[in-house]
Amino acid sequence: MASKHTSRALRSSLRQLSAPRVQQRTFAAAVNASRPTLQKVATPAFVQQTRGMKTVDFAGDKEVVYERDDWPRDKLLEYFKNDTLALIGYGSQGHGQGLNLRDNGLNVIIGVRKDGASWKEAQQDGWVPGTNLFDVDEAIQKGTIIMNLLSDSAQSTTWPRIKPMLTKGKTLYFSHGFSPVFRDQTKVDCPSDIDVILVAPKGSGRTVRTLFREGRGINSSVAVWQDVTGKAEEKAIALGVAIGSGYMYKTTFQKEVYSDLYGERGCLMGGIHGMFLAQYEVLREKGHSPSEAFNETVEEATQSLYPLIGQNGMDYMYAACSTTARRGAIDWSKRFKDNLKPLFDELYESVREGKETQRAMEYGSRSDYREAFEKEMEEIRSMEIWRAGKAVRSLRPENA
């Protein structure tokens, strides 16, 4: 997570960008796109189904995906012509999803605490008080689709006030399965007479916004907790496109929150940070300079190798490296997997049993949460590895 001042600086820079025309590139086209010819690669088979749904073979498992092209802008406008999308909360996801919905022409309003920090940030993004910016209660009363994008802990603390306003005919939308799945702890028990759906972008709200502006679109998962109208899934898919998804795959609320909490604490954030620190510290203890230790731990990974994995997979990265590099990497990867798998199994059980939920709620509900978080960020910024990284980044040609 970026610090508060970093987030605002990023938000300011995003506002200065001009939105390019959205490219119409489908997921099917992306999967079948030409791959650099290090080796010949088989492409997955697609079966065209209703409304453009496609069954894709993911390593032997067939899954249904939904594409942005199935829901062009005029179709979205027609589908949601009688709806008011009340987006509650203006943090990372609220910012990205809200601006994308607005740019897509949908009737979206923001609900936040009047004159609070989020209210002021929403005004900076062009939301107008009394027109499309309201306090939470008024926004929910006006909305037909209530997009609850408050933080997980805030969803819990505000639920007693919000629940009575979720009257029959409204739809409740989440971007994380946390609150309903762990309802014994969060106390978020959804009314039984409304649709409850989920669209979970696989990235931060900043990425949701950036990819939308670039005409690309983030991948998201969609799920239904409760289908009263018989149209909950269709509504979720349409909203997924409206917020900026390029393609979507189906999941459940439970699987979404388990995989999300697990991934964040593992390879996506916590685990990779831990590995960076461990490797860097050993290099420094063995006499390597800060610049060399950082370059061999972080800079080469993020600037050279990880992009290759993102483009075409691990085998592509290995094939792009020297014989010596790939021989050692393949050998040691097995040892790392054997040593790390028990820890990852422990992590998953901690998620499943609700221990991570309890920890997150206790921390997020602290009155000094923001101050405590900033203190932790300052401790990270002050680490030698990241101070060295700042110097290394300044030497990149584009930063000269």
Image (cartoon, rainbow, N blue to C red):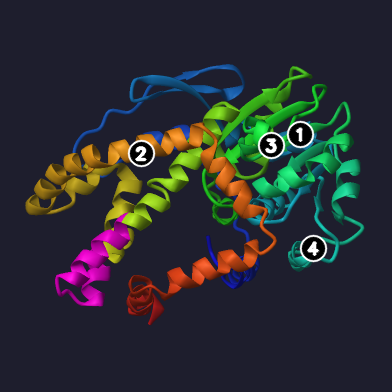
Sequence-first disc among 1 and 4: 4
Do the CB atoms of the residues marked 2 and 3 lie less than 8 Å apart?
no
Sequence-first disc among 1 and 2: 1
* Residue 51 occupies quadrant: top right
Sequence-first disc among 4 and 3: 4
> What separation in Å lies between label 1 and label 4 (alpha carbons)?
22 Å
Residue 177, x across and y down, in percent? 61, 35
How busy is the neighbourhood of tag 3: few (under 14 within 10 Å), some, or many (20 plus)? many
Do the CB atoms of the residues marked 1 and 3 lie less than 8 Å apart?
no
**Residue type at tag 3:** Leu
Residue 203, label in figure: none
Dot 4 corresponds to which residue? 119
Residue 172, label in figure: 1
Residue 148, x across and y down, in percent? 73, 43
Answer yes or no: is residue 257 visible.
Answer: yes
Dot 2 corresponds to which residue? 344
Is residue 288 magenta-colored? yes
Dot 3 corresponds to which residue? 239
The range drawn in magenta is 275-296
